[in-house]
Amino acid sequence: MSEQLHNPKLEEHPGSNAEKDPDNWVSGEDPMTGAQASYLTTLCEEAKVEPPAEGLSKAEASKMIDELKQKLGH
């Protein structure tokens, strides 16, 4: 029985890495993604600034990330 059974759980979901792609973080009024929030928190810790309150939009979070990266010289 060398036939492989079709198992959709083993297939990569087409949008599975979309949240982790920074190019998807920069636009829109949608709430920031979990990956974006995590990255922003990391930058805030490096810069020794208070992380923002939850509820930032993707665009607002992206702007803050850019400002922190510039401040930190990334």
Image (cartoon, rainbow, N blue to C red):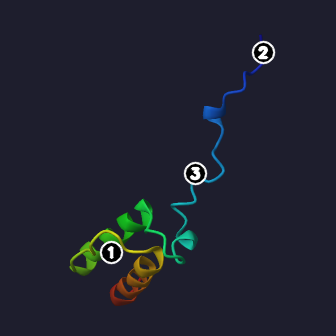
Q: Residue at x 74, y 21 (%)?
A: 4
Looking at the image, tell me whether mark 3 or mark 2 is earlier in sequence order: 2
Task: State the residue in front, 14 or 57.
Answer: 57
Task: State the residue in front, 16 or 3.
Answer: 16
Q: Circle 1: is it few (<14), some (14-19), or many (20+) Cα within 10 Å?
A: many
**Amino acid type indicated by mark 2:** Ser
Q: CA distance from mark 1 to mark 3?
A: 24 Å
Task: State the residue in front, 54 or 11.
Answer: 54
Give SS at disc 1. helix
Give SS at disc 2. loop
- Disc 3 vs disc 2: which is toward the camera? 3
Give SS at disc 3. loop
Q: Circle 3: is it few (<14), some (14-19), or many (20+) Cα within 10 Å?
A: few
Q: CA distance from mark 2 to mark 1?
A: 50 Å
Q: Residue at x 22, y 80 (%)?
A: 49
Residue 68 location (% of width, % of height): 35, 84
**Amino acid type indicated by mark 1:** Leu
Q: Quadrant of the N terminus?
A: top right
Q: Circle 2: is it few (<14), some (14-19), or many (20+) Cα within 10 Å?
A: few
- Disc 1 vs disc 3: which is toward the camera? 3
Residue 34 location (% of width, % of height): 41, 60
Q: Quadrant of the C terminus?
A: bottom left
Rendered image: mark on residue 43: 1
Relative to residue 14, is residue 64 drawn left or right? left
Query: Residue 37 lies in what quarter of the image?
Result: bottom left
Residue 69 location (% of width, % of height): 39, 83
Q: Residue at x 46, y 74 (%)?
A: 58
Q: Which residue is mark 2?
A: 2
Please, is residue 17 above or below residue 29 in the view?
A: above
**Amino acid type indicated by mark 3:** Ser
Rendered image: mark on residue 22: none
Q: Which residue is mark 3?
A: 16
